[in-house]
């Protein structure tokens, strides 16, 4: 790409202006790569009318500054992990980690990243109050269920049997098996276990668990609904749950 820009500069009557444009483009491309990992920086934007620079500022979507790839955590202590996020040892940090996980999923199905952030949120919550964090465990189950749904969508099927012999996706998201079908089954089983733990968790960050109707409508639990009888699972922990109490919410387009 850079060689193409240089060629444009050589053919232009205004080489200095194009050199400035190319330099600014490289700055924005670099900033774009950083924003994939939610680092924060202020970058001047190239205006629609080329030739006027530095008049606007774009900020990356997250205020946390360090690369948040969970692979870098290793065997770090809780305080060290939180320091990577520029967070402190308090309940506010739990809420911020929950929000960050949601942003990771919204940004592009970064399941392993979101799962790690939620795991850290649960560890921090347990450290602070001696109890698991229901919302974090619930969202981890959602990560696993959604990963199974996306695996099925990529091969255009709704049957786990059709995944037999295919390669599993999202290898950094545990549990993981090379075979797509075995991986999907393992992730669904793990998601069920997480849901059970989440529904037993006490209130701490607000009302928990959410209303049964909301849980039954959750779009990101479609795989559990289809392959692990989500409604029956919820009924065991919520006596007022019933298959006819609400209709499934349509996905937003």
Image (cartoon, helix red, strand yellow):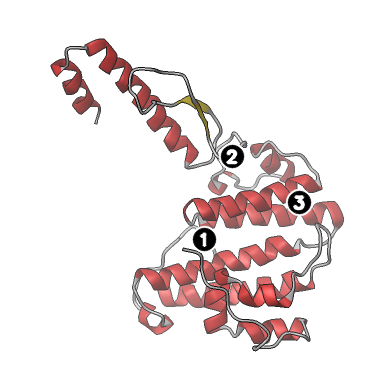
Disc 2 and disc 1: Cα gap in Å? Answer: 23 Å
Say which of marks 3 and 2 sits in front.
2
> Which element is circle 3 on?
helix
Quickly name the residue at label 3.
124
Q: Quadrant of residue 210?
A: bottom right
Say which of marks 2 and 1 sits in front.
2
Q: Quadrant of residue 228?
A: bottom right
Instruction: Identify the residue at image location x=64%, y=78%.
Output: 216
The vertical placement of 89 against 248, above or below, is above
Residue 179 left/right relative to 218: left
Instruction: Identify the residue at image location x=43%, y=81%.
Output: 160
N-term mark: 3 or 1:
3
> Which element is circle 2 on?
loop
Disc 3 and disc 1: Cα gap in Å? Answer: 20 Å
Quickly name the residue at label 2.
62
Kindly tell me whether residue 178 is visible in this rendering: no
Q: Quadrant of residue 16?
A: top left
Quickly name the residue at label 1.
173
The quarter of the picture where the N terminus appears is: top left
Instruction: Using the image as rendered, state which of residue 50 and residue 243 is in the foreground.
Output: 50
């Amino acid at each position: 790409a850079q060689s193409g820009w240089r060629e444009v500069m050589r053919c232009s009557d205004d080489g200095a202006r194009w050199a400035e444009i190319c330099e600014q483009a490289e700055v924005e491309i670099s900033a774009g790569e950083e924003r994939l990992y939610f680092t924060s920086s202020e970058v001047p934007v190239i205006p629609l009318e080329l030739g006027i620079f530095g008049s606007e500022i774009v900020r990356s979507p997250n205020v946390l500054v360090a690369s948040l790839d969970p692979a870098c955590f290793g065997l770090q202590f809780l305080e060290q992990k939180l320091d990577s996020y520029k967070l402190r040892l308090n309940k506010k940090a739990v809420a911020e980690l929950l929000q960050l996980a949601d942003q990771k999923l919204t940004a592009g199905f970064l399941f392993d990243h979101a799962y790690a952030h939620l795991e850290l949120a649960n560890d921090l919550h347990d450290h602070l109050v001696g109890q698991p964090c229901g919302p974090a465990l619930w969202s981890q189950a959602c990560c696993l269920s959604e990963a199974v749904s996306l695996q099925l969508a990529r091969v255009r099927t709704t049957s786990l049997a059709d995944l037999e012999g295919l390669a599993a996706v999202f290898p950094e998201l545990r549990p993981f098996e090379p075979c797509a079908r075995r991986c999907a089954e393992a992730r669904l089983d793990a998601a069920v276990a997480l849901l059970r733990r989440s529904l037993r968790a006490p209130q701490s960050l607000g009302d928990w668990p959410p209303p049964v109707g909301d849980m039954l409508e959750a779009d990101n639990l479609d795989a559990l609904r289809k392959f692990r009888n989500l409604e029956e699972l919820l009924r065991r922990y919520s006596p007022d749950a019933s298959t006819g109490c609400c209709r499934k919410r349509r996905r937003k387009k």
